[in-house]
Amino acid sequence: MSLNAFLDYLLLEKKYSKLTIHAYQKDIVEFSGFIGLEYGNSSIDTVNYSQIRSWIVSLVEKGISNRSINRKVSALNSYYKFLLKTESIQINPLAKHKALKTSKKIQVP
């Protein structure tokens, strides 16, 4: 199943905004590029959790906030759930992933 089919699913069935869909696409393409460079793997459908963890570590090393990393991982998790739903993969490599801890935002009255 292609990324375009996933993006259409988000737009037509889930009714996500175009900005959200664009962010999801950017995050998934970024992950795909990382996997291609680091592992020579052209398909993110066949990655394992340790490869995803190495991407997360690389994001932490770049100084990206935990909140932003969690958003990127959430986009990737949504893609894997879609692939499961369409029977394109058998196992979601992010099924047991726990989000990174984030600090509480202080509300200003």
Image (spheres, rainbow, N blue to C red):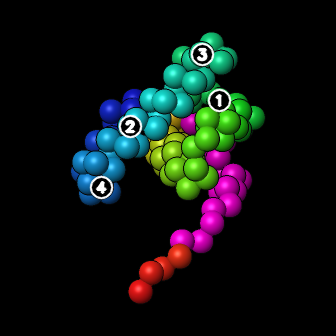
Q: Which residue is mark 3?
A: 37
Q: Nearer the viewer, mark 1 or mark 3?
A: 3
Name the residue type under label 2. Answer: Gln
- The numbered mark, 4 or 1, whose residue comes first in the sequence reads 4
**Magenta region:** 89-105
Left/right placement of residue 100 relative to residue 29 reads right
Residue 58 appears in which quarter of the rendering? Answer: top right
Name the residue type under label 4. Answer: Tyr
In the rendering, which numbered label is found on residue 25? 2
Seen from this angle, which residue lies furthest top? Answer: 40
Q: Is residue 57 magenta?
A: no
Q: Which residue is mark 4?
A: 16
Viewer-closest of 56 and 4: 56
Residue 26 appears in which quarter of the rendering? Answer: top left
Name the residue type under label 1. Answer: Val
Judged from the image, the secondary structure of the residue bearing numbered disc 3 is helix
What is the C-alpha distance between the residues marked 3 and 4? 30 Å
- Asked if residue 37 shows in the view, the reply is yes
Left/right placement of residue 30 relative to residue 66 reads left
Labelled pair 2, 3 in contact (Cβ < 8 Å): no
Labelled pair 1, 2 in contact (Cβ < 8 Å): no
Judged from the image, the secondary structure of the residue bearing numbered disc 4 is loop
Residue 43 appears in which quarter of the rendering? Answer: top right
Judged from the image, the secondary structure of the residue bearing numbered disc 2 is helix
Left/right placement of residue 86 relative to residue 92 reads left
Dot 3 alpha-carbon crowd within 10 angstroms: few under 14, some 14 to 19, many 20 or more: few
